[in-house]
Amino acid sequence: MNTTTQTGVSGKLPVRNPRTGQVDYWAEPISESELEQTCRDLRRHQLAWTNGGLEHRLTVLRKWADEIERRAKDIGHAEFIDTGRHRLSHEVPLMVAAGLRDWCDKAPAILKAGHRDGRSASHPNVTFEAQLVACPLVGIISPWNHPFLLATLDAIPALIAGCAVIVKPSEITPRFIAPVMESVRAVPELYNILRFVVGDARTGQAIVERADMVCFTGSINTGRKIAEACARRLVPLYLEMGGKDAAIVAPGADLERASTAILRGSAFATGQICFSTERVYVHESLHDRFVDLLVKKSEALSLSFPDPHSGHIGPFIFEKQAAVVDRHIDDALAKGAKLLTGGKSEVLGGGMYMLATVLTDVTHDMLIMQEETFGPVTPVMKYKTEDEAVALANDSSYGLSAAVFAGTAEQAAAIARRVEAGAISLQDAAVTIAIMRDAEKTSFKQSALGGSRMGPNAVLRFFTRKVLVLNSGPTADMQDLAERAAA
């Protein structure tokens, strides 16, 4: 099927089912005139939303959490069709609702701590009072790998701050938008300041041209284009652009624990997670035993085909991603890597699937150790010294997250402090999600641009800070200043 031709004829966006490989849904994109009017409407209602006060906003958002739970089955089913993941897709709406309530519980303390009132240290008669002014309209462009969860990652804190929000999820996985918008419409105050819209890259570009702040999750190439567009308009932005997470297994590590955690970090959700484990460095004294365990555990995993309710590894959501992973495996094998289990993608029932795959004898001149793979592949490389392990882990243009396994948590932390990544799991892998609303972190290198999207700053970044300065003493006089200068 010629997707471009189909899109041009129908005016709709073709959506592929990852389990069948067939286009079985056509998404109606928002027109530019509709988008323009939507942005105007959101801006018109934003002032009342922010002036209504924090408690009002939290009341409304808690109502939304209730509506999400009421429609959890519909939202989960829509995401399941687009991602091919049954259990996880049906868990996500409940995760979003729980996270929404948790943010509401934390928000009063976050905003209280964000205010800075006091007295000047150099001028005793001068006092100041902070004012947090919410960004009027936040534009969010979210990815296909976790459609609903990542569409709300920035949206919920922005709404708490008092912003109006427009979200354009990926056109690859848009089916969840309809049931989510039903939950939004069920809360009229929320519908006034929150919209999820269907669209492609052109829609995303139009949002970037209209928003007062942009949040993007996706590839480096697209992130760079958005950054350039925001720079021209001088509007702030927050970008998260993927990772190539390293895991270090040091002497003394519990290999059973490390192999289990690293396999989960590599293969969970078919490896289609930005913080999945994509490079593993194991001390030479542990390498063979670790690899034996990893291979054995990898071979125990099965594909969730033909029954989506069974198995461990679902299909690739985006068929082009399967081609990327295959290319990385081919490149590695051509340069001397060994394939111990798994292999390239295969077509089953029209969908693209891949077994958990383990490669050894990999080197840093291979694509699989440098570029983001985004598949259920675990490449393992041995090292001799801690300095070498750290150097290898840091030899990347990415710095999203990482993992370290050692004899003790203290030993793991000592190594982790030398690794250039924003969040580092100790004695486990890919557990950043557990502290997303609690701890702030900033990713390194090309993985991100902007401040922390986690912890208190997730909310505070959506404010412009004003300060009201009061001088309760005599005001300075130009003649007095001149006389002092002359003296």
Image (cartoon, rainbow, N blue to C red):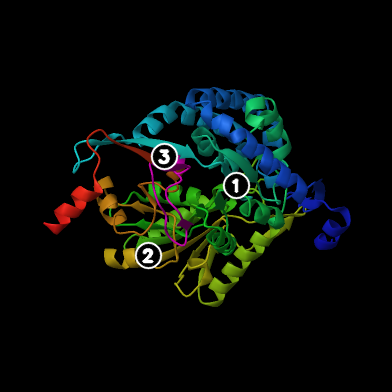
Q: Is residue 90 visible?
A: no
First in residue order: circle 1 vs circle 3 = 1
Q: Give the amino acid at mark 3.
A: Ile
Q: Where is residue 40 in the image (x, y as percent from the top left)?
A: 67, 41
Residue located beneath label 1 in the image: 139
The quarter of the image holding the N terminus is bottom right
Is residue 425 toward the left or the right of residue 338 in the image? left
Tell me the quarter of the picture where residue 487 sits.
Answer: bottom left
Residue indicated by mark 3: 435
Left or right of 312, for residue 420: left
> Can I make out residue 166 in this image?
yes
Q: Is residue 342 within the magenta segment?
A: no
**Alpha carbon separation for disc pair 3 and 2:** 23 Å
**Number of the label disc, if any, that sits on residue 394:** 2
Question: Could you tell whether 205 is left or right of 236 in the image?
Answer: right
Magenta range: 438-466
Quadrant of the image occupied by residue 82: top right
How far apart are labels 1 and 3 at the CA level? Answer: 25 Å
Depth check: 106 or 145 in front?
A: 106
The disc placed on residue 156 is none
For badge 1, the amino acid type reads Gly
Is disc 1 placed on a helix, strand or loop? strand
